[in-house]
Each structure stands twice: as C-alpha cells, then as structure tokens.
Image (spheres, grey):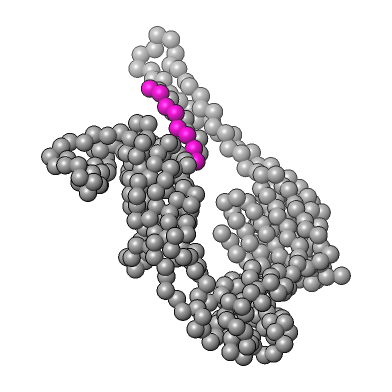
Amino acid sequence: MKILSVIALIFYATGLTLWSDPGWAASVRIKDLVDFDGVRGNDLVGYGLVVGLNGTGDGIRNAPFTEETMSNILERLGVNVTGEKIRPKNVAAVFVTGALPPFARAGSRIDVTVSTIGDAKSLLGGTLILTPMNGADGQIYAVAQGSVIAGGASVEGKAAKITSGVPTSGSIPAGARVEREIQFDFQGMSTMRLALRNPDFTTALRIEKAINRKVGRQVALMLDSGTVELDIIKAKARSPAHLIGQIENIEVTPEQKARVVVDQRSGTIVLGDEVRISKVAVSQGNLTLRVQETPMIVQPNPFSTGGQTLSVPRTTVAMTETPGTGLAEVSGETSLSEVIQGLNALGVSPRNLIDILKSIRAAGALHAEFIVQ
C-alpha cells in the first residue's frame, strides 16, 4: 500500500525521527494553496524617535542624526534650540516597519515593529513619538505612535554584561493608524487569477475541477502550473468578493514533487513521501586518523660549554578503521519507509545520513529533487 503524507525529520544532535500518520492524505483549502490576484498587503517603513529610555539611548557622538532629528521635532513644536548642544541619553533613533493589509480602511490599526539604528542599548520602557510611515511610492499611508514592548533586557556593570533576548527591537500592537487607503478597483474585475504558492500542474488541475464542480459551470481555467484563471462574468456572481467567499474553502489534495531537503547547518533532513530509490547497495564504515605531538626537551650535559637546550619532535601516528556494518542492498522502487528502515539497519548515525544520501544521488539511484541549504 502506498504511504501518503509521510515526512521524516532526522536531527543531528538527537538522532530523533518523527513520522506522521501514513494512512491518509491531507486535504487543504484553496485559500491556503493560492494567492488571489489583487488581494495583497503593502510594506510600510518610517523613521522616528523613541523617548523615555532609562539612560539606554543613542550616544550623540556615534549617532549625530538623533540630535538633529530631535532638534527638528522641537523646532516644529515651537521650541527654539538653535545653537544649543543637546546631550540626552534617553532618546533613540529607530526604523518603524509594518504591513498594510489588503483592503485596509482609513482609521483601522496595524501592528508595527520598532528597531534601533544607532548605538542604543535597549528600548525597554520607551515611547515612540508620532512617526509617518511611507509606502514604496513615497506616500504616507499610516502614522505610528505608542509604548514600545521590548523583547529582552540588558544589564551591565563595570566588568561584566549580560543580555537576554534582543532589547534593541520591540513592537507596538495596533500601534499605527491607517490614514490613506490604497485605491484598487476590485469590484470592476472581470477575471481573476489564482497564483499557486507551490506551482504544480496536477494541483492546478485539481483546483480547476473543484471550482467548476462547486460553481456548476466552467468558470475556472488552468493557464499553467502556477496560475488558474477565474471568469467572474461566467460565474454570475454578485461581485468578485462573493465568488472568492464561495470557493476559498473548497478542499483540494495538493500534489508534491519528490524532494529531499538537506540543511547542513542544523543537520536536518526532510524527505517527501514520493521519494524513490532504485536498486542500490550501501556499505558504511569509519576511518579514524590520530596524530599526537609530544615534543621532548633535550638539555646539555652539566658543566659543558657551548651546549644548547633543544626541542626534539616526537610524533605518534595511529590509524583505526571501524568495521562497516556490511553491504546492505535496497531493492528497486523503494518507498520512503523502506529507505529509512534500510539506513537504520546499517546502524548509521544521523551524522552520516546526509553523506549517504549524497552518494546515492551521485550513483543515480535517488529519484528526487535534491536541495542543499
């Protein structure tokens, strides 16, 4: 019986193998498989000041732009500081980032992230003052202000310092208010494209058939492996929003490519259920070389003249080969579970699994896309 929806996660440090239930294939809603044309967010960024810090702000010598910004703000508020030297320790210059969600209306609120750009040590207890947030077109779409929730703490003394988390970055939940709406004629669309997040011809075809079956007429057409087009006029829906609400919760079983993903930094191996290995034999053993240097000091004879103290090298070289577990044969068209069982039968540690998979791929027996991160 073909095993469906099985993922093996093999970790270097623990050697742990996790298995999902092989008895079923998960169905996924269309809204979780595709992005709807025109339904997208927009990134925003702004530059501002965080005040009220407990002596953990920017140093004016290393961040002169903080003093300049603060002077400009005070000037706009009617405080004349021209020619004055301001040396505060409770102010930090920051970048404010956020995302304007699709169809956001004026007056709604969004979350923002605040990050220092100078040498401030912590944003704990700080307050972001009114900061305009611009889009890619340079227009102001939101303004942010509020108390910063820092994600860490930093304590230091004269000879020691300890930091927990990242105190130089924080967030303000619902800290920005939308001031400008993005103009988009969503109601006037006659066609709409669904962009698959993981392009696949089989998945796109299944989405097309599921939508047509739900609507009762041919309104969906697969254009390529990553695009399905909807004919809103043919669907006879009251609006594009009504059509999306009608089809987005339809469940489809996505098809996945046979793929092996290897992350050498964390030592993680992920194998999809469709991975197949042709008939191949695997043998694994360890070869250890040990070189030890033990130099010896030679002293001249007592009362000798012209003698010198010398260091004489002494090197010990040893080679140890751990016998392999023998030659294990993997039969043709092997499934994922049989591959893992075969590797475990060899007594192979998780540290060597990546090298074995690379060798099997080099031998042309691994029938899957091999991705190394």
Q: In x, y percent, where is residue 298?
A: 47, 20
- Relative to 319, residue 97 above or below: below
- Relative to 94, residue 56 above or below: above
Q: Is residue 156 magenta?
A: yes
Q: Nearer the viewer, residue 37 or 173?
A: 173
Is 161 positioned to the left or the right of 341 in the image? left
Residue found at x 63% / y 87% = 235
Residue found at x 81% / y 63% = 22
Residue found at x 60% / y 73% = 34
Q: Nearer the viewer, residue 335 or 86?
A: 86
Q: Nearer the viewer, residue 119 or 180?
A: 180
Hey, which quadrant is residue 314 in on the image? top right
Hey, which quadrant is residue 357 in on the image? bottom right
Is 70 positioned to the left or the right of 82 in the image? right
| Quadrant of the rendering where the N terminus is positioned | bottom right
Q: Which residues are magenta?
A: 151-158
Residue extending furthest toward the right: 1
